[in-house]
Image (tube, rainbow, N blue to C red):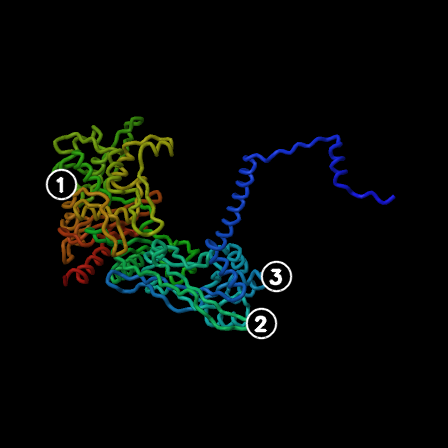
């Protein structure tokens, strides 16, 4: 019999005889929707990723591709120039050479990374670890090349080119050339290289505060190569754009004179630390800013480890007990609160005594620097009588009531009111000056003292801060900004260093009549024979001022201050002179102030 043939009917028949029954059902609409939604979502993800890679990251991957085939080099952009108020360039860009590392080219031969780092370190006088750290921090999402060293010598250029390393590029660059580096160091600051992007960034001073304005846009060029690596020429694919210029409020010649006069004054005393500030009290423009010791911003590395901290900007970051320079504010607060009237006299016999409740035979004695006799508000400012300001700040004990004319009871402002007026004139807070790293200072109060020391606030604490001693800490720029507000009749401006910025009035107390009494007291400080700044009476224009001697380091050292302004009636300049650890107190600061004000009169005002 022939083989059984496969018959369709048999299959159907067998199927019908099967023990299992099958039921055919149509797919539901919900199933179609779920499948369709899944396909749509997957499609969106795929096409979204394709779009992202081609559009958002297209330029990046194009550059990576070019870097793999050709040699892409950055074209460094010059930073903007910084000028003084009269148009003198304080920093310029000088042509130089720098070393860049093409990360993409380097990563193609990972086995040579360590050897390349060693060769670069040897030529550039760097540590292998430093170069490795730069490579490790490289962000290829942002850049394909990194600056390893800038402003290298011609001999280093020759040595690098002799290595013929494809990943190492020596390119034309720009060196920041600071004019009179040490004199303008704390104003201009300096630049450095970002470890992540290889960009030149401002590190301090105006270079840091206005970095985004000064920084240009780097360009790029491609060195085309054939399959054998032979050069086919160079093409610029993006031109570099120079950064924007800055015109400052700084008077360069005044800055030079002030700096050198401070240097000579400190050298005479055998000291090295101090601050000199000058500003226009009618606008808030900073005319000069000196912080000593300073640093040459053309060679910052030489100053990094010096114990004298030359990179520290004392003018805006240093904390100082202000001494008697705070007395004009105490006088103003006492007048405003009607604690006294300007004519009321207090007797200074050289001290006041506060009874000791635990030992009546041992009262606490608070000294004046001399016995001044009867003093009113103006003469107390001029003479700088401590007893008078103890009385205004903390009041007099009942036992000392005969020290006040007509035995009038004076309760004093107290620490809370003192704090209120310190804050009104923005002491203990940042002024907002356009320089980085400004500090706030410290305003003492009863609660803080008790939390910190476990001791209550006593009247002696109030006496101390009323004459600028104790825990009261201010920055020089805060102190001068307050004095400038006395000079201009009550307006507190935000100090600034860029000429095209507008003056910003932070507070306006020009309707305070009491300011005139304080102004007269500061004028008498110079005009009267007994004034502590009478040395300035020989100036060719009338000046006003206040001296101060602040005891620090457990009364083992004295910081000398002078703050003032001129001309007295219509001030155009306010200045501060601070000498750290002065030998004879405030007397050492006054001659420097005299010479600076005299220079300003003859160089800036006499011919107007």
Residue 530 in view in this figure: no
Residue drawn 20% across and 30% down? 411
**Mark 1, mark 2: which one is toward the viewer?**
2
| Image quadrant in which the C terminus is located | bottom left
Q: CA–CA distance between discs 3 and 1?
A: 79 Å
Residue 68 in view in this figure: yes
- Where disc 1 sits, the SS reads loop
Q: CA–CA distance between discs 1 and 2?
A: 86 Å
Residue in front for this viewpoint, 371 or 241 = 241
Q: CA–CA distance between discs 3 and 2?
A: 21 Å
Residue in front for this viewpoint, 57 or 379 = 57
- Where disc 2 sits, the SS reads loop
Of marks 3 and 2, which one's residue comes earlier in the chain?
Answer: 3
Residue in front for this viewpoint, 273 or 363 = 273
Residue drawn 50% across and 69% down? 224
**Mark 3, mark 1: which one is toward the viewer?**
3
Report the side of 360 relative to 176 (left or right).
Answer: left
Q: Which numbered circle lies on residue 228?
A: 2
Q: Which numbered circle lies on residue 111?
A: 3
Q: Which numbered circle lies on residue 513?
A: 1
**Mark 3, mark 2: which one is toward the viewer?**
2
Of marks 1 and 2, which one's residue comes earlier in the chain?
Answer: 2
Residue 436: x %, y % from top left: 35, 51
Residue 233: x %, y % from top left: 48, 73
Q: Are marks 3 and 1 in contact (CB under 8 Å)?
A: no
Residue 313: x %, y % from top left: 34, 52
Of marks 3 and 1, which one's residue comes earlier in the chain?
Answer: 3
| Image quadrant in which the N terminus is located | top right
């Amino acid at each position: 019999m022939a083989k059984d043939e496969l018959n369709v009917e048999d299959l159907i028949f067998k199927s019908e005889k099967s023990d299992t029954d099958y039921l055919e059902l149509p797919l539901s609409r919900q199933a179609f929707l779920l499948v369709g939604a899944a396909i749509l979502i997957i499609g969106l993800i795929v096409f979204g990723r394709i779009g992202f890679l081609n559009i958002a990251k297209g330029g990046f991957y194009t550059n990576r591709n070019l870097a793999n085939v050709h040699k892409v080099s950055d074209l460094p952009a010059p930073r903007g120039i910084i000028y003084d108020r009269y148009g003198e360039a304080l920093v310029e860009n000088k042509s130089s050479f720098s070393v860049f590392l093409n990360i993409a080219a380097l990563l193609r031969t990972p086995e040579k990374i360590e050897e390349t780092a060693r060769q670069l370190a040897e030529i550039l006088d760097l540590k292998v670890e430093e170069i490795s750290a730069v490579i490790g921090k490289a962000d290829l999402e942002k850049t394909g090349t990194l600056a390893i060293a800038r402003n290298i010598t011609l001999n280093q250029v020759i040595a690098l080119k002799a290595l013929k390393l494809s990943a190492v590029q020596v390119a034309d660059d720009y060196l920041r050339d600071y004019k009179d580096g040490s004199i303008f160091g704390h104003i201009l600051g300096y630049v450095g290289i970002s470890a992540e992007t290889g960009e030149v960034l401002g590190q301090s001073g105006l270079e840091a505060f206005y970095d985004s304005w000064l920084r240009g846009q780097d360009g790029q060029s491609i060195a085309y190569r054939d399959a054998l690596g032979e050069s086919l020429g160079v093409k610029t694919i993006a031109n570099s754009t120079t950064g924007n210029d800055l015109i400052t409020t700084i008077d360069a010649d005044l800055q030079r004179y002030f700096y050198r006069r401070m240097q000579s004054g400190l050298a005479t005393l055998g000291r090295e630390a101090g601050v000199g500030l000058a500003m226009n009290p009618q606008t808030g423009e900073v005319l000069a800013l000196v912080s000593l010791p300073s640093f040459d911003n053309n060679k910052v590395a030489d100053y990094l480890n010096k114990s004298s901290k030359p990179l520290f900007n004392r003018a805006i970051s240093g904390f100082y007990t202000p001494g008697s320079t705070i007395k004009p504010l105490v006088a103003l607060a006492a007048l405003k609160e009607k604690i006294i009237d300007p004519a009321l006299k207090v007797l200074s016999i050289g001290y006041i005594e506060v009874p000791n409740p635990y030992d009546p035979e041992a009262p606490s004695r608070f000294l004046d620097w001399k016995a001044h006799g009867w003093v009113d508000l103006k003469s107390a400012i001029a003479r700088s009588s401590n007893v008078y300001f103890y009385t205004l700040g903390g009041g007099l004990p009942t036992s000392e009531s005969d020290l006040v004319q007509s035995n009038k009871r004076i309760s004093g402002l107290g620490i809370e009111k003192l704090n209120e007026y310190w804050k009104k004139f923005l002491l203990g807070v940042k002024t907002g000056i356009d320089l980085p790293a400004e500090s706030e200072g410290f305003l003492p109060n009863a609660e803080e003292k008790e939390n910190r020391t476990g001791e209550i606030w006593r009247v002696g604490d109030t006496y101390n801060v009323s004459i600028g001693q104790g825990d009261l800490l201010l920055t020089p720029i805060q102190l001068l900004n307050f004095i400038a507000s006395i000079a201009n009749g009550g307006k507190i401006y935000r100090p600034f260093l860029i000429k095209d910025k507008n003056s910003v009035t932070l507070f306006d107390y020009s309707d305070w009549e009491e300011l005139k009494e304080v102004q007269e007291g500061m004028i008498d400080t110079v005009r009267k024979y007994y004034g502590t700044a009478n040395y300035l009476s020989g100036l060719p224009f009338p000046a006003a001022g206040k001296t101060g001697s602040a005891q620090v380091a457990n009364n083992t050292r004295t910081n000398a201050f002078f703050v003032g302004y001129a001309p007295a009636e219509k001030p155009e300049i306010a200045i501060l002179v601070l000498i750290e650890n002065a030998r004879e107190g405030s007397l050492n600061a006054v001659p420097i102030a005299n010479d600076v004000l005299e220079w300003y009169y003859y160089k800036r005002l006499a011919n107007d």
